[in-house]
Image (spheres, helix red, strand yellow):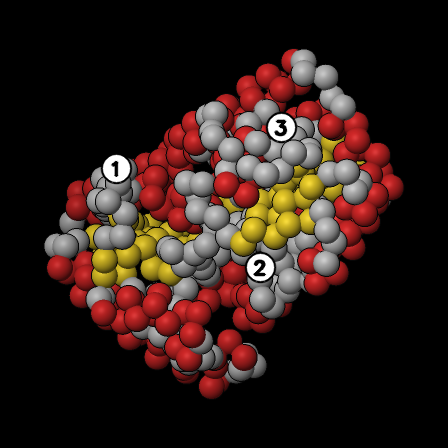
């Protein structure tokens, strides 16, 4: 099978799991995958919190960080100037082109070490780097959209135009939601949706109670994931104050740029645990009485398909969520609110839910939405692209 160069926005050692990292690791079960994360900038070099991570990257051009995924190779990118702050124009384009050229000299060097003669290229939501330069043969190009690129200011600055160009230049475009598919199909008719999923086995098991819950005797409402731009902090505050008899556990890393929960931190029944490893995350969900997705209803959240949805359902827990998107067949098994008053009421309903077939239905539905099933779709797309290239090569070989 053709090796893959997988360029993506998330860091491979990020504090929370990502769609890109999950897919790239699963693809590496059948082939070599060379993962290139979005680079740190020279400004990041001065941040004490990033010192160890950056130092590790500076020591090696490439590494194999996961012993259980020996075909997953990280190519450490060079750090970059903070050019995202520049306006679109000749200076930005010049500096970007220079960086891409230097980056791909490193990539080609690593590919040469591994004796790679050709590769397939997948860019997951980092379209400013889609204009790559490689001397190694690239057999196909896929652009993968996981979010609304105009929804987050940093990414949107150059990403909106870059995503349009990447979609046009790609052989195939894949998205994680149907609204994203509709948006990008305008630029490339070869656009399809493969929704996010969950590691069902990982999240459906019985786990011991996590350490932070051991002295907790009240019912627990759990949120897991990034704590940033999407969260409706005011609604969470109202719900927590309306249910002083419940404990609200917010589990995940705070986004220093978009965290807006200072008031929440002062409420006695709200607990921020910080980030948890992917290995430890299911125990917190397993010992929750209900799980929550308190997203704002915006254009950004309408276009997403959150990983946590299937992770919650895998445990059979009732899920309280805002009506931020169309949930389709999930809707009848969730508690969906459209106001804070409704959220307060429906949380009570979720906690009073009888232990009946709804739990089994949630688990059954989640068992259909596994990464194993999703990877069948990914492999079908890659096989189709490889077959097309093979047919074209055979045609030219016959004609010549």
Q: Residue furthest bottom?
A: 91
Front disc: 1 or 2: 2
Up the image or down, 281 lies above or below 169; here it is above
Q: Which numbered marker is on residue 121?
A: none
Residue at the image point whose x is 13% and y is 59% from the top: 113
Please, is residue 119 above or below residue 51 in the view? Answer: above
Q: Which residue is depicted at the point 72% across and 51% down?
A: 268
| Residue positioned most to the front | 215
Assign a secondary structure to mark 2.
loop
Secondary structure of the residue carrying tag 1 is loop
Q: Is residue 278 visible?
A: yes
Counting other residues with Cα less than 10 Å from the Cα at mark 2, is it few (<14), some (14-19), or many (20 or more)? many
Looking at the image, residue 393 sits to the left or right of residue 38; the answer is left
- The answer to whether the residue labelled 1 contacts the one labelled 3, judged by CB atoms less than 8 Å apart, is no
The residue at which mark 2 appears reads as 254
Of the pair 33 and 159, the residue shown nearer to us? 33
Which residue carries the number 3 mark?
317
Q: Is residue 158 above or below residue 385?
A: below
The residue carrying pointer 3 sits among few (fewer than 14), some (14 to 19) or many (20 or more) residues within 10 Å by Cα, namely many
Front disc: 1 or 3: 3
Q: Is residue 176 left or right of residue 340?
A: left
- Residue carrying label 1: 30
């Amino acid at each position: 099978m053709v090796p893959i160069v997988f360029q993506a926005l998330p860091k491979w050692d990020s504090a929370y799991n990502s769609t890109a990292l999950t897919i790239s690791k699963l693809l590496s079960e059948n082939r070599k995958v060379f993962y290139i994360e979005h680079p740190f900038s020279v400004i990041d070099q001065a941040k004490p919190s990033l010192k160890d991570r950056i130092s590790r990257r500076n020591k090696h051009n490439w590494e194999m960080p996961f012993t259980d995924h020996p075909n997953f190779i990280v190519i450490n990118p060079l750090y970059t100037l903070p050019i995202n702050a520049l306006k679109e124009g000749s200076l930005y384009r010049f500096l970007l082109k220079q960086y891409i050229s230097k980056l791909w000299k490193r990539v080609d060097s690593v590919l040469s070490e591994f004796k790679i003669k050709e590769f397939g290229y997948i860019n997951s939501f980092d379209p400013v780097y889609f204009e790559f330069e490689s001397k190694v043969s690239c057999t196909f190009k896929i652009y993968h959209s996981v979010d609304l690129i105009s929804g987050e200011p940093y990414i949107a600055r150059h990403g909106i135009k870059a995503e349009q160009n990447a979609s046009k230049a790609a052989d195939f475009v894949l998205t994680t939601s149907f609204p994203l598919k509709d948006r990008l199909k305008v630029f490339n008719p070869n656009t399809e949706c493969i929704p996010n999923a969950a590691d069902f086995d990982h999240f459906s098991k019985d786990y011991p109670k996590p350490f932070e819950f051991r002295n907790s005797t009240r019912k627990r409402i759990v949120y897991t994931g990034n704590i940033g731009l999407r969260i409706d902090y005011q609604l969470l505050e109202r719900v927590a104050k309306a249910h002083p008899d419940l404990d609200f556990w917010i589990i995940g890393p705070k986004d220093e740029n978009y965290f807006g929960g200072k008031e929440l931190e002062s409420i006695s029944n709200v607990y921020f645990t910080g980030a948890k490893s992917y290995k430890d995350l299911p125990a917190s969900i397993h010992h929750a009485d209900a799980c929550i997705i308190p997203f704002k209803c915006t254009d950004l959240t309408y276009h997403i398909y959150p990983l946590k949805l299937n992770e919650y359902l895998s445990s059979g827990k009732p899920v309280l969520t805002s009506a931020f998107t169309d949930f389709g067949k999930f809707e009848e098994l969730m508690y969906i609110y459209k106001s804070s008053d409704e959220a307060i009421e429906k949380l009570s309903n979720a906690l009073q839910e009888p232990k009946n077939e709804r739990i089994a239905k949630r688990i059954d539905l989640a068992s259909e939405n596994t990464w194993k099933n999703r990877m069948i779709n990914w492999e079908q797309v890659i096989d189709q692209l490889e077959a097309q290239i093979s047919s074209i090569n055979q045609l030219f070989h016959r004609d010549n």
